[in-house]
Amino acid sequence: MNATPMLSVRDLVVSTHKQDLVKGFSLDIHKGQRIGVVGESGAGKTMASMAIAGLLPPGVTARGSITFGGEEERFEDARPGVSPARRGVAVVFQDTGALNPLMRVGRQLDEALRLAGVKDARERRRAAVSLLERVRIDRPEQRLRAYPHELSGGQRQRVLIALALACRPTLLLADEPTSALDVSVQVEVVSLLNEVADAEGVAMIVISHDMGVIARLCEEVVVMYDGEIVERGTTGQIVNAPEHPYTSKLIAAVPKLATVAGDE
Ligand SMILES: Nc1ncnc2c1ncn2[C@@H]1O[C@H](COP(=O)(O)OP(=O)(O)OP(=O)(O)O)[C@@H](O)[C@H]1O
């Protein structure tokens, strides 16, 4: 692994005025690396990743330091902003209303590409078609005219991945990228994320309550429980020899997981 991580998070604490939601989160990720953050609902996975992306909700603040692309930002009960250095981070949300239901897919991609600095409208149109091709959506020209409800759940998740790729990220934060999908479609989206990460060379932080999804996507895993990291290691180590009882519980919830880790 090369020496300087692309992203370094140190002692991140995320709080409301009442309580700490994340109680000291540290993580390094290198170019092209894929790290999973696993834990049950409410463990603080989303809050940690939203702090990294500069997208904490109102009333939630952060303490600690985040270094991205060599630029360190320190926070003292502040909301991290999206600094230019952070522009290389994109978030893939889960398909539960993340797309604007009133806007055609093409318009949403056009907007994302405009924000990413593509000035020429024809160039944006070409780029939108190419993004849909890269996420393996068939008949891309036609899909640009579709509204989200005219697409299947799997196709909408693909569009969300295409939107994330529009800003040419170096780091993708995928928050429960498959949770809203049927099992067979989950498998397709996991393969697509693997394919995209390989082809584009992006690093990925995958957040999920499902150790099975993480094991298929990531070489390293961080386990969160009640706002804290309770265990970390390679996927093989965590799956085959978990040290924390909570990790064992997460693994037991996925019956075929030993086979998945064995396949790697
Ligand atoms: N906007 C908010 N304001 C205040 N507290 C919040 C807000 N959103 C979430 N929380 C609280 O923060 C804690 C951590 O939530 P977080 O969403 O990070 O957990 P998670 O591990 O990602 O779980 P899930 O998969 O359910 O989102 C929870 O106790 C949750 O109730």
Image (cartoon, grey):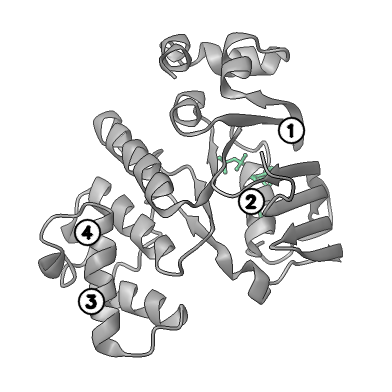
Instruction: Check mark 1 vs ligand 1: CB closer than 8 Å? yes or no.
Output: no
Residue at mark 4: 133
Amino acid carrying label 4: it is: Glu
Amino acid carrying label 1: it is: Asp
Instruction: Find residue 50 and report its image quarter.
Output: bottom right
Q: Residue at x 72, y 12 (%)?
A: 243
Residue at mark 2: 49
Cα distance between the residues tagged 2 and 4: 28 Å
Residue at mark 3: 126
Cα distance between the residues tagged 3 and 1: 45 Å
Q: Does residue 103 appear in the picture of this structure? A: no
Circle 4: element type: helix
Q: Position of residue 131 (x, y in %)?
A: 29, 64
Q: Is residue 39 above or below residue 159?
A: above
The answer to which of marks 4 and 1 sits earlier in the sequence is 4
Instruction: Check mark 2 vs ligand 1: CB closer than 8 Å? yes or no.
Output: yes
The reply, left or right, for residue 45 in relation to residue 107 is right
